Image (cartoon, grey):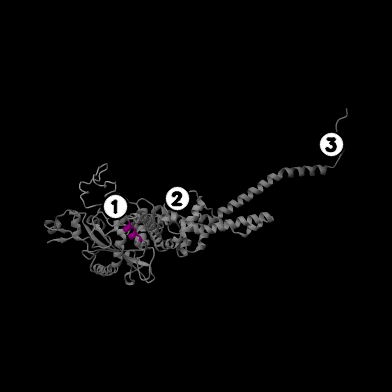
Amino acid sequence: MDLNLGGFQLSGDAARDPGKRETSRPRKDLGDKANEKAQILMSRFYQMYGLRGVWEQHWEEIAEQMIPGHIHSFNALSIRTPGQKRMQYVYDSTAILAVGRWAAIMDSILTPYGKRWHTIEPEDASLLKDRDVRMWCDLATETLFHERYAYTANFQGQIQMAYKSIGAFGTGSLFIDELSRSKINPFPGLRYKNVHIGELYCAENHQGVVDCVYRYFQLTARQAVQKWPDTISEGVRLAAEKFPETMFYFIHCVCPREDHEWDPKRMDGKGMPYGSYYIDVANRAMLSEGGYRSFPMPVGRHEQFTGEVYGRGPGMDLLPAVKMLNSMAMTHIKAGHRVLDPVLLVHDDGVAQGFSLKPGALNAGAVSQDGRPLVHALPTGNLPIGDALMERQEKLINSGFSVDLFSVLTESPEMTATEVLDRIHQRGILLNPAFARQQAEFQGPMVHRELDILLSAGLLPPPPRRMIQAGGGYRVKYTAPVNREMMAEEAAALERTLQEVGQMAQALQKPEAVDTFDLDTAIPEIARIRGTPERWIASAEQVAAARQARAQAAQAAQASQAAPGAAALIKAGAVASQGASPANLPRGPKAA
């Protein structure tokens, strides 16, 4: 008897007597109902698998030209050898570099490292008057960024891969989960993993929101036993002991629970709105069943066409230009080779016999008696024209991937910082629609998922009572550079208006004109627009106390300044009350 381990065969004693191993444990079966659910989910997966076939052909062509490392990774039946060379279709690296720079641009504008690119605010704007609510929102924002950029989370590396996928293929996703605790790392936290588009199968609800994701992925036998020690099949367990690096296929399905499966009163996975199912593909058996309170795999799409679930990115739009550039580069290489090592044309009279192309060689008979060459080079193409055509395609590719967005930094190095920012802002307007979609569709669900994990793990205290009484709703306010520029217009408008009104008030001698503006409201909002932390802004009580102390100090200072004059007046009054008697009159100089 042989055990089929997903393409790897074990035979002999190891297959016939798996009970000999020392670390064996009986497999826990989740029951017929769970396995029946696994069959239903696998049937749905195979339907989605068939519908995605056309996309895979398109993605494969893009990968060949722009991300060669992803070649043969979009179909489970494709054979991939780790470390295999995959650059055989590339003659020019412009597109490969442009995709990487696109990811860097998206990261620097949407999720810049070291900066707060969003804040948390209550859904009810009136709650911002409550300092406890503002302080909790500020704490939630700070905790999010602290946990997100922890070294155990690996956010920065994974978000870069997601942006790269969105740029090339139009679709990218992150799997956001709580950090697994172990004896090596016993502390809670966040953990991010880029979901490669080859593993991603997604579906939308009736409103066009991705709410169902199937992830078709591989794990080694050792990893599978670590993840499902009780329910993994005997074949995989045997492979983990004998051949631990053998690969096996699994399915992770995340989708909304059906009404008859969801019981909000329960505290386990069946009480959560999203079901989580891990399935062993080879055995068509359920390995684990759980749930999520929030969607764990937000999907970002660059541009979406009618009737399509997956997005289309700049890579699809630029594929013709990239293929043309590679074709031109190949032709240019051939033409350059002919120029540097030309084909020689000789008369058929034996002149070429013994002809040497070595430097310094002497070739007799290559010219006539009158000095006319008898050997000529084959005419080649016009290399400058080829250079111009390739440069045109390179500019088109760099423009499509927005690489030229920051070219102003090298085009005009003599410009001031203000002029550079204005130029970048003007060009960045073209990217605003793409950025807005990523914030609404990708980053919004991501922040919601992160907050859910932090609250359940106890890394963030519950919201204040007043916020809970109002429903506990919150919203994400994006403060990335592209958003901050838009919000800065409000602050700049107030600054310009106050400057103009101040000049008018000074000219007309009417300082009360400034009283038209509610500066107590405007100044804290400007501070938030500039990114000032809430804990640095004084509360209303602190402001009132400071003003009261200032008024008392002013009164005391005024009293101390008026004290000498008051004393003189008192003295003069005393003299007047005594009358002008001779004894009180001032004495003149003594007589000689």
Magenta segment = 321-328
- Foreground of the two, 570 or 516: 516
Q: Amino acid at mark 3?
A: Pro
Which of the 4 image quarters holds residue 444? bottom left
- In the shown orientation, is residue 234 left or right of residue 541? left
**In the picture, which quadrant includes the C terminus?**
top right
Mark 2 → mark 3, Cα distance in angstroms: 88 Å
* Amino acid residing under circle 2: Thr
* Foreground disc of the pair 2, 1: 1
Indicate the position of residue 483 as horizontal and vertical percent values. Answer: 47, 58
Q: Quadrant of the N terminus?
A: bottom left
| Residue bearing mark 3 | 586
Q: Label 2 neighbourhood size at 10 Å, few (<14), some (14-19), many (20+)?
A: few
The crowd level at tag 1 (other Cα within 10 Å; few <14, some 14-19, many 20+) is: some
Is residue 369 placed above or below 61 in the rendered structure?
Answer: above
Name which quarter of the figure residue 163 lies in.
bottom left
Check disc 2 and report the residue beneath it: 410
Percent across and percent down for residue 178 are 34, 57
* Residue 209 in sight in this render: yes
Q: Which residue is mark 1?
A: 338
Give the farthest residue toward the front. 370
Residue, far top: 592
**Which one is in front in this view, the residue at disc 1 or the one at disc 3?**
1
- Give SS at disc 2: helix
